[in-house]
Image (cartoon, helix red, strand yellow):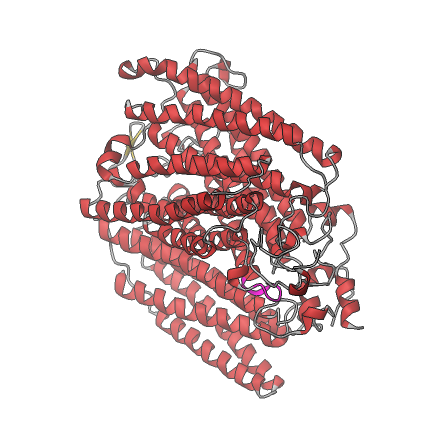
Amino acid sequence: MPHTSATEELEIIEGRGGAKPPSDAAGDGDGPIGSGSAMPQRIYVTGITVAMAGILMFFMAFVSAFIVRKGVGTDWHAFPLPRILWLNTLILLASSVTMVRAQRLLARGDRRGFGHWWAVTTILGVLFLAGQLIAWRQMVASGFYLATNASSSFFYVLTAAHGLHLLGGIVALLYVGRGKLRRLTFATATEVTSLYWHFMDGLWVFLFLLLLLGR
Amino acid sequence: MSSHATTVHHSEAPKGWLRHYIFSLDHKIIGTQYILLGLSAVTIGVILSVIMRIHLAWPNVHIWGFANGVVSPEDYLRVITMHGTLMVFFVLTTVPQSGFGNYFLPIQIGAPDMAFPTINMLSFWVTFLAMIVLVSSAFVPGGSAISGWTSYAPLSAVGVIAGPGQGLGQTLWIVSIALFCGASLMSAINFLGTTIDLRTKGLSLMRMPLTVWGWFITASLALLAFGVLLAACILLLLDRLAMTSFFIPSGDMVSGVLLKHAGGSPLLWQHLFWFFGHPEVYIAILPGMGIISHVLSTFSRKPVFGYKAMVYSLSAIGFLSFMVWGHHMFISGMSPYSGLAFSILTLVIGVPSAIKTFNWLGTLWGARIQFTSAMLFAIGFVSVFVTGGLSGIFLAQPALDLYLHDTYYVIGHFHLIMGVAAIFAMFAATYYWFPKMFGHMMNETLGKIHFWATFVGVYCIFMPMHYLGYAGDPRRYSSIESVHYLFALQPVYKFISIAAFVTATAQLFFYFNFFWSIKHGKPAERNPWRATTLEWSVPTPVPHDNFAGHYPTVYRGPYEYSVPGAADDFVPQDLAPEQVAKA
């Protein structure tokens, strides 16, 4: 229901979504079209879906640059792949599984169980990022810095870009886990977060394979 | 609290000047902010072109603001870089989409605001910051960048060693464009989310005004293109600041110094840049196409000829725009087979473009045209679009492009089709929507003087450039005085310059008309053009949440003009069917 805080103008959308549709004679239909009537909560799902398309293009630009740079450069040296990346990949895959588990529990109405598995997901996400930092240390230990070779340049660029995007996912996990939501319903917030999280997971698997096989 | 009370509660505008006008979440204020930002950018951009034209025609004339009044070749490159960057990013990309789109898309689809108002505000302020960073680069040691709006590597990648302006100035240029990319991505998400989910009851996709279609397709292009430029900017920054070698080749000797970078590919930058850059030119023009279709229909008092064909051709142009970036690189040594593929795909864009042109003419055909200022600029748009499009067919052939590449022919081509056409669309949009935005009419006499001076002026400026190109005159030369085979062209330079001064001066009519009419123009009624779309159904000024909680129902398409049996020669989209025939 409506807030009466100073930020009420932020809530324009909720005013139409959280509450019943406007009492306009035409506004009480529930057809697929009609923002006055349908659930505007879906804008957040649409928004994140659209955003993921943009993020995908951002990463594909790096990936195509990787392929071209490797193909045209005569100076490409493969770097030794930090072994911890295997573990990190497993951790991230596991986090997607725990997230699915959390959402199943939420669907059954088990808010406590949800909170538990949601927290596990968050911790796994943090562990992944910590593992990525260790991977950077391992790269440095084997003498591959950002500018050592184009291959290592791409390693740092791809992992950093993915890590920053994943950090955004962790912020979302913490925000939803705290449970104090303003504009989104709890169901929407978990759906939006999980879409993004699984996307980051899948994207990492792709990038890992690229680094593993393409370096 | 009842739902009705809730709606009324939420329709209150925020209090306080700062929240209302500066950090506003209202799409109309944000749209106006974008338009004013674009107006400042275009003002600087035009002043820079006047400086260029003075220098080109009279190279020895001293110009205020340059060291000893002398415009050095580097200074000239600085000026073209700033002119191009401001115009392409902060005018052509910003105003038709983020400016007019922000203002009118939510109203035209019957929504209270954009889907994500906070992100909308953030987009504007990041764009604003990007422009501050860009303009500030002119005041750092070494001055602003000299590598053009395309910032080709390795010139843009090697740093200050490549000349003044390639140090901090170039870094700031890249930072500015990276910020702009981020802002455009946020804005694109907002436009797409709003159009997909916030359309009012009855407003199916095929009932959306073509303006909304234009903004929607443009947002899709922006979403897919700006991320690529952002990635390219990051790699370029790393080459400059972290000694990586993405774009700098082995053995690159700059200013007598052998660089340590190795193995990079300057062509990689071109590919990444133009993969963004070609959709970018459609990001500049597609909103204009939507606006023009809208204005032509209104003042022809006829439905848009072939509405569905317009939608499909708009989508086809958007789709194809991602497959033709190679036509900017015909002389880069690409395989002739790639060149052929890019050439054919480029020529294919001519088909949907021709469909649009024929449909615009079809809309005008047999109409009792009302020659308002907005309509004149819309017709002018069709004219320059055709002229600029025809020269595009020449440039799309690799064999011809080998000769014409990087000549004034290209300058003439893209200024007409991208620059002038989009600017004409902005003028049409301003004259058309001004009554709704400010509650007053603009002066029509001044508007017509403005149109005719501008229309004749731009042809006098850009048509002769095609001849300069045929004569082999390369772009980016600060002076042709000492170039023997070009010297005979100097009279053409002078003609173009005089035309440019006259055209630039004619814009004063617009500035005066715009600012004077905000306060002193004839008061506008709610629907002065007797138009059909939803923005004309709301009061002027438009309330904070557009519809004060009473969202309209749409019963029909957007261009129902001169419908037989209807009481008026226009049937608004939200007019209930039983009321259509009433007097």
Left or right: where B474 falls relative to B456 = left
Left or right: where B529 falls relative to B241 = right
Which residue appears at 44% of the width and 67% of the height? A200
Residue B44 image point, x, y percent:
55, 29
Q: Quadrant of residue B451?
A: top right
Magenta region includes residue B115:
no
Which residue appears at 56% of the width and 34% of the height? B41
Q: Quadrant of residue A78?
A: bottom left
Q: Magenta part mainly helix, strand or loop?
A: loop
Is residue B450 visible in the rendered structure shown here?
Answer: yes
Position of the C terminus of chain A, as image quadrant, is: bottom left
Residue B460 vs B109, above or below: the answer is above
Residue B174 image point, x, y percent:
45, 41
Q: Which residues are magenta?
A: B196-203
Which residue appears at 38% of the width and 30% of the height? B412
Magenta region includes residue B198:
yes
Is residue B245 visible in the rendered structure shown here?
Answer: no
Residue B107 image point, x, y percent:
64, 55
